[in-house]
Image (tube, helix red, strand yellow):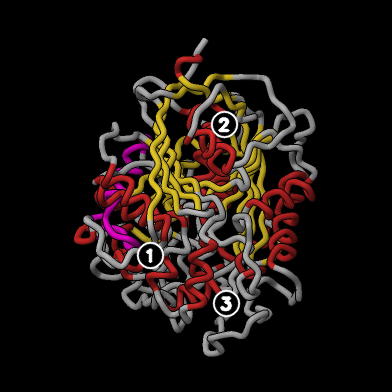
Amino acid sequence: MIGITSYGSSTSAGQGVEALWKGVSTGQNFLKSFPTESWPVALNFAPKVCSWPGERPSSAQDRLLFHLMVSWREAKARVDLSADRVGVILASTKGLIEDYIWTSQSLATDLMTPLLKAFCQHAEIDAVKMMVVSNACTSSLSAIWLAEKWLEAGAVDSVVVAAAEEVGPFVLQGFHCLHALTASVAKPFSKERDGLQLGEAAAVMIFSKRESDVVVSGVAVDVEGHAVTRSAPSGNSLKRAIDALNLDEPDLILAHGTGTQLNDEIEDQIFFAEYGTRPAITGSKWSIGHTLGASGAVDVILACETIRRQTAFRLGNTEAVDPKFRSRYLTRNSDVAVEPSRVLISSLGFGGIHAVTMVEKGAS
Amino acid sequence: MAVTCSFDFLEFAFPNPEPPSWHAQVERWYQMDSASYGLCELWTKMPDQVAPSLIFLASPSGCNEMDQQFIKSGAASPSKFVYTLPSTRSSALLQLMNWQGPLFCVQNDPSTIVSALGEAAALVEGQQTIWIVGSQHTDQNLAFRICLGNAGSLALQPSKAETTDVVTDVQLLNWLKKPSSSLNLNTGWILQTSGGLA
């Protein structure tokens, strides 16, 4: 068990956790359509499809660093790390891809470590340990797993998990050719669901062994050798991850809930098999988009807020749940009178990778 | 406490026009990136290792090679796009191994493998076996596997002796291919041959 000491975020809902909470809990959709008709783009194409509020003609590193620093300042304002040995983990899928892919230069390094080092430099963190975790859409929860190990081993006093993702032409075209994007809006767990919407986000979470009012009581990651991209329809890997937690039932689930056919089917099937209709299920991607490697961090932050505020939020675009589904969902018109004390967050990613985290009320 | 480990590697040709021996088990094997292909070749030729309880997939240079290929091929191939994600690299290997469990794709250039080795050494305990797998592309394509926690000719010894020098993946792989005396990884561990254990 590790304490969630502090956190901050910058998403398409705005800068700060309050903006994120307000946006998601009042049913706002912050996403705009990304144009794909301009493909193929010329070399040195300047991406102009970002969903970050405001236009900033700059590099991917500038943009990601800016939003990471917004998140860091919010998180850092509530905690003093000056005496701590600090570890830093960056969670991301494609990092600085848009900065170099459109040039002919080859890159001698991976796309994440330069961002991690730049973040540590700007945040003035003299990290005793650093690592990038790139487990596709489970990157954030996987990073929390590693943070827990570092803290349990006593290798560090605090761990900063920084997650950041932006959507440029590379990522956009990738999802476009996968036919994973909806032409309208994402409607997770709805019968009308036909794909996901991409979004951008940065989030920073600070973990320690200190007492906290919200804690991570467990985190598990499971990968299956089923197929190159898609998860097995049986959902066995997600089930194994949940079973590995070996914890009491949650009263709320923040599902991955992308709005794709297979993702939502697997989640419904496994959540119902594990918990029946007892926990309410909701999600955030219909509002701020699927922020890929950062999505788990955003959902952990939202889970903390549901516990602190003793309420939940709805799946704002979902009016009627797919009649095949058997779990209990917080749809657009649902009563959200949930008083969560234990929240499960799930993430599913390419390569058949699944991760779950339980966030619950802490002692302090 | 010291951690014993072993090192396997395979230099392989890529792309290979001939279907590999395992082609029937992996859908669209011909669209794999070189790292995924090399890991499958390594597993097929050297399968006799204790199954791991956890795997680190170390990706020096990330997926840069496949990122470029995706764009150069017109950015229209879903198969190429998914191989721009490190987690997809592990999928074919796991299918051949018939393995499932926790796997972490890590990067920390220029010391990605070095860092993964430090993490694995700190985590391995009891009867656990942890693998670090990955590939390196310099003059040749090289797939590798480091197995910690079972018998092996190498050992990781905890050490507080650190220098300011960064140990790179290239240095580590060169040492692993021809082990001699010891290598201070600067991650709290010294790598040495088992005969040199205190």
User: Can residue B132 be seen?
Assistant: yes
Q: Residue A150 shows which numbered tag?
A: 2
**For discs 2 and 1, the disc positioned in front in the rendered view:** 1
Q: CA distance from mark 2 to mark 1?
A: 39 Å
* Badge 1: chain ID: B
Q: Earlier in the sequence, mark 3 or mark 2?
A: 2
Q: CA distance from mark 1 to mark 3?
A: 28 Å
Q: CA distance from mark 3 to mark 2?
A: 36 Å
Going by the image, does B17 lie left or right of A75?
left
Kind of residue at badge 3 = Pro
Place of residue A86 in the rendered image (x, y in percent of width and height, measured from the top left): 69, 34
* Badge 3: chain ID: A
Between A335 and A312, which is closer to the camera in this rendering? A312
Are discs 1 and 3 located on one and the same chain? no
Q: Residue at x 69, y 25 (%)?
A: B162
Is the C-beta separation of discs 3 and 2 under 8 Å?
A: no
Of helix, strand and loop, which one carries label 1? loop
Kind of residue at badge 2 = Trp
The range drawn in magenta is A224-248
Q: Residue A169 shows which numbered tag?
A: 3
Are discs 2 and 1 located on one and the same chain? no
Kind of residue at badge 1 = Pro
Going by the image, does A61 lie left or right of B169?
right
Picture quadrant where residue A111 is located: bottom right
Please name the residue that numbered disc 1 is placed on: B15
Place of residue A182 in the rendered image (x, y in percent of width and height, measured from the top left): 43, 79
Between A29 and A279, which is closer to the camera in this rendering? A29
